[in-house]
Image (cartoon, rainbow, N blue to C red):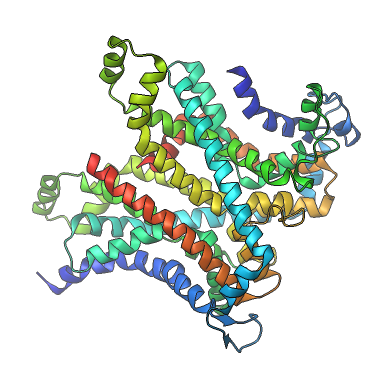
Amino acid sequence: MLLLVLIFAMPFAWMLSTSLKTLPETMIFPPNWIPKHFVWNNFARAWGSGPFLHFITNSIIVSIGILVMQMMTIIPAAYAFARYKFKGSGFLFGMVMITLMIPSQLIFLPVYLQLSAWKLLNTHLALILPFASSAFGIFLLRQSFKQVPEELLEAARLDSAKEWQIILRLMVPMAKPVLATFALFSFIAHWNDYFWPLVMTTDETARTLPLGIARIRQEEGVANWNVLMAGNMILVTPILIVFFFAQRQIIRAFVYTGVK
Amino acid sequence: MTTWEKLRPYAMVAPAITVFSLFFIYPILYMIYLSMYNWNFVSPVKHFVGFDNFVDLFHEKEFLQVIANSTAYTILTVTFTIVLSLLLALWLNRSGWFYGFVQGAIFSPHIVSLVSIAMIWSWLMDPEYGLLNWIIGLFGFGKLAWLASQKTALVSLVIVAVWKGLGYNTLVFIAGLQSIPKDIYEAASLDRSSPWTTFAKLILPMLSPTIFFLVIINMIGSFQVFETIAIMTQGGPVNATNTLVYYIYEYGFRFFKIGYASAAGVVLLFIVGILTILYFKLLSKRVHYQ
């Protein structure tokens, strides 16, 4: 049991340990798990190897931008699919379900050519727009909108509530747990993403944090593991801290959204 | 019904449908179209070549190896992930803070960026100064080249993928185990069936929807592996870890053989498509269950 925890914690502990060592000390065996001298300078060097504030700003713009756009597109769509009968709804929902399984790794090449024709490469929009909606979000939210009893809606309509008021004051508050789950899921996925920013950008104007961290490797050379691991710490620590405090919710979010 | 009331649902789904059409449906069709042309992205002229790109692909030794690599990677990753996570789930399916803590610990890699994971494991697998070689040295084994050798590189990537995916799969299995009614276990223990019979005759069949779900999800994910390859091996040594997405990436972005890369994309589409159809068949069955 402890061995199991060790197997999963060891790589992270080793990263932390290496990030505080001098270069010669990274090559000592048996290894020192606690460095002799704490070399905080590794972090300064990693941070100094690129415009990290810029990378972080880009990451925030892209992840939050995606999330806001997703909320704006999935809430009305999920409501329409859950509550209205209209011609072609079956076909349109089928289209949503098909895109549910089309991963970005499959279609990056044609999307790249398209965004290039629109002169959108190297912009935040190129990183946000393709994910501005989520089939998965629509699917999840539609399920929970369906569960709201019709009487509640009728009562609200008798009070002469407009449809958008019903959505914002009734449906959205009731679906809060599902929305929060989806938001968490989406934010972590796009905050961590390396693939899409890599293929859609060629310079640093819109590049995000994971690309910045991968860049340290070129700047510092492959052998400077201490600086590399310090850079890696910058990427990993915020997520691990959030995970530490919100472990139950995060696990529930991922497992719930995965199974359903 | 006013005109607005008739149009309203369409207006509400329009933004989402627009995004899907522009960034999912249209690109797929465009990729299929491009796969039948020779084009280098820079020149304005596209030459129609029909299915030549596909014929070329399947005559290319490198591509055949890419397919073999992707398949081997997928089979190894999925098998180890499923078997190990099922065993872990049977063991960790208990309450108590300590079990919760272990579940959290093994889940943590799942939320960390693959960039970090790839870099940490590159360091652990460093042939000279990596921790892994030191650890296996303690048990009397010689140093392995891990990512640097054709023999071990693909397996090394599988180790990383299993390490990352184990926690998530285990927790999905635990969720599956907890949905099995308690009286079934009680009936089994009254019958004095051995733990193995209980597992093989009761638990395994009840878990089969979860198992199929995880097998397919993991397969689809494994066929799209990119980050660990881009950071840890760049497809090498000697093409030993080159996989489909990385291959498309290289042909599209480095060699600008757009038609050829698109054809490889269509092959990937075909594979993922089959897995997806299986997945939806399963999904509709699961909905029936409830």
Query: Quarter of the image containing the C terminus of chain A?
Result: top left
Left or right: A82 as drawn, with respect to A47: left
Tell which residue pokes out farthest to the bottom in this image: B45
Q: Quadrant of residue A85?
A: bottom left
Left or right: B47 as drawn, with respect to A217: left
Which of B104/B132 is in front?
A: B132
Which residue shows up at 12% across the image and 54% down it? A157
In the picture shown, does residue A83 fall above or below A3? below
Which of A67/A2 is in front?
A: A2
Tell which residue pokes out farthest to the right in this image: A24
Residue A9 percent across, percent down from the top left: 64, 28
Residue B98 percent across, percent down from the top left: 51, 17
Which residue shows up at 65% across the image and 86% down it? B43
In the picture shown, does residue A242 fall above or below B38? above
Which of B276/A159 is in front?
A: B276
Is residue A239 visible in the rendered structure shown here?
no
Residue B9 percent across, percent down from the top left: 23, 65
Query: Quarter of the image containing the N terminus of chain A?
Result: top right
Is residue B100 visible in the rendered structure shown here?
yes
Which residue shows up at 84% across the image and 43% down it? A224
Left or right: B92 as drawn, with respect to B119: left
Residue B133 percent across, percent down from the top left: 80, 32
Which residue shows up at 33% across the image and 47% down it? B282
